[in-house]
Amino acid sequence: MTEEPVSIVVMGVQGSGKSTIGSLLAERLGLPFVDGDRLHSERNIELMAAGTPLQDADREPWLHSVGEVLATHDGSGVVIACSALRRDYRDLLRSYAPGLYVVEPYGPIGVVRERVQSRTHEYMPPELLQSQYDTLEPLAGDERGIRVSIEQPPAAMVEQILQHYPSATGVAG
């Protein structure tokens, strides 16, 4: 671990475990946890609840809101669950927190679909899962962070993340 906490975004599609992993990770690191879903505008929530995938123009103000939270915690650290599905979304977040560490829980769509269908989300219908996979750009080798398989228990995922955080300069996993 470093002496100065690093802000973390747990990215990925719905049902990949962003909130579960993010809250466990925040607890272990003694950092605040923010669920990025709580930062969406009413309009975005209405679109998603109606089964309409968000477009870049819909996501941009939300990503700036997430970025502002990151900037507020710059130097003190925070863990935020935020889909951040595309590289340019993560680059925008890095403009607010240059040392950002990104965690990507990943797994086959069938495993995630099973999870999504067995839970209730206040506005994210299972029908949007395919559009999220279509948009997803996995964490690249030059991005600071780690990819972790969702086909292991959340506690094991957190341990794997902690073994690499924040020493990894590229993607591990």
Image (cartoon, rainbow, N blue to C red):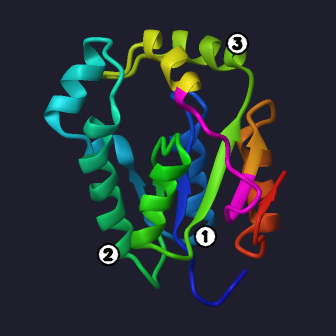
Q: Which mark is residue 110?
A: 3
Pinpoint residue 4: horizontal percent, then vertical percent. Answer: 58, 87
Q: Which residues are magenta?
A: 135-146
Front residue of 92/165: it is 92
Determine crowd level at label 3: few under 14, some 14-19, many 20+ residues with C-alpha closer than 10 A.
few
Residue 17 got which mark? none
Q: Hey, what amino acid is under mark 3?
A: Gly
SS under mark 2: helix
Work out which quarter of the rendered image holds the N terminus and state it: bottom right
**Left or right: 163 in relation to 64:** right
* Residue placed under numbered mark 1 in the picture: 29
| Residue 31, above or below 92 | below
- The residue located at (52%, 70%) in the rendering is 7
Dominant SS in magenta: loop
Report the residue at 35% width, 74% height from top. 71
The reply to whether the C-beta atoms of the residues labelled 3 and 2 are less than 8 Å apart is no
Is disc 2 surrounded by few (<14), some (14 to 19) or many (20+) residues within 10 Å? some
x, y percent for residue 33: 44, 58
Q: Disc 3 and disc 1: Cα gap in Å?
A: 31 Å
Q: Residue at x 68, y 65 (%)?
A: 144
Please name the residue that numbered disc 2 is placed on. 72
Distance, label 2 to label 1, CA atoms, is 18 Å
Would residue 78 be counted in the magenta stretch?
no
| Mark closer to the observer (2, 1) | 2
Relative to 46, 88 lies left or right? right
- The reply, left or right, for residue 94 in relation to residue 6 is left
**What amino acid does circle 1 point to?**
Leu
Q: Residue furthest bottom?
A: 3
